[in-house]
Image: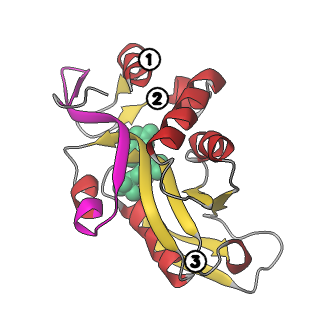
Amino acid sequence: MKLLKKKIMTDGKVVNDALLKVDSFLNHQIEPELMKEIGREFAERFKDAKVTKVLTIEASGIAAALMTALYLDVPLVFARKKKSAVTEENLYAAEVYSFTKKETNRVTVASEFLADGDQILIIDDFLANGEAVLGLCNIVEQAKANVVGVGIVIEKSFQPGCEKIRKAGYRLESLARIHSFSDGRVNFMQDDTK
Ligand code: 5GP
């Protein structure tokens, strides 16, 4: 997605050889117009997948996932990383190791929001080792729902997540695919021309 890649080039900050900071438009301050275009693009790519719900993980996946859900005209559910103040009895849960925080979170979704037979599109902001996405896939399977695809805003293709997701048989669509970071610059995959 050209607009997104342009934004990453101008506003993204390479922190080290594995981490990109995009706090000015995605992870802290959020640009609504860009999120709108991201949502439109995911909705277009998954328009034939008969999606019934979008699923993401709090917090930074929510903006892109919400816009996608809006364009697909389906609800958005986000998995929680913290316990709700109100005790929930029936939860689906998965352990997810956080790439950025280096800690394991128990992520949960109330069972009432995922139904047997739901066609789930998983959306997240970044893909690194695939922990977050595979944790969400696990939750979807517990609900006997079906993962119809995974949409990622920024895929770091040099890390193992993309390979793991494809190997597990899930359709993966990433809007920007990063080959590497070098000298503080972002290098996109050669074949990332969409
Ligand atoms: P994974 O679970 O695939 O290892 O990592 C994905 C999660 O870690 C995303 O939900 C995102 O919040 C965070 N993450 C991974 N890599 C980056 C990165 O380079 N920059 C930022 N800002 N977040 C990242």
Query: Is residue 100 something one can see in this rendering?
Result: no
Image quadrant containing the C terminus: top left
The magenta-colored residue range is 165-189
Mark 1 or mark 3: whose residue is earlier in sequence: 1
Above or below, 57 against 7 in this view is below
Please, which residue is most extreme toward the bottom here? Answer: 89
Q: Is residue 194 magenta?
A: no
Q: Position of residue 85 (x, y in %)?
A: 81, 69
Front position among marks 1 and 3: 3
Q: Is the residue 54 above or below the residue 105 in the image? A: above
Of the image marks 3 and 2, the number of the one nearer the N terminus: 2
Residue located at (18% from left, 20% from top): 183
Q: Quadrant of residue 108?
A: bottom right
Q: Which mark is residue 117?
A: 3
Which numbered disc, 2 or 1, marks the residue that appears first in the sequence? 1
| Residue where numbered disc 2 is placed | 22
User: Residue 91 location, x and y as percent?
Assistant: 66, 81
Q: How is the image coloured?
A: secondary structure
Query: Are the residues at dot 2 and dot 1 in contact (C-beta closer than 8 Å)?
Result: yes
Which is more foreground, mark 3 or mark 2? 3
The image position of residue 70, as x and y in percent, is 68, 42
Which residue is pictured at 39% across the width and 27% down the height?
1
Give the prevailing secondary structure in the magenta stretch: strand
Within 10 Å of the Cα at label 3, are there few (<14), some (14-19), or many (20+) other Cα atoms? Answer: few
Task: Give residue 46's position: percent from left, percent from top.
Answer: 47, 48
- Determine if the C-beta at disc 2 is less than 8 A from ligand 1: yes
Q: Residue furthest front?
A: 48
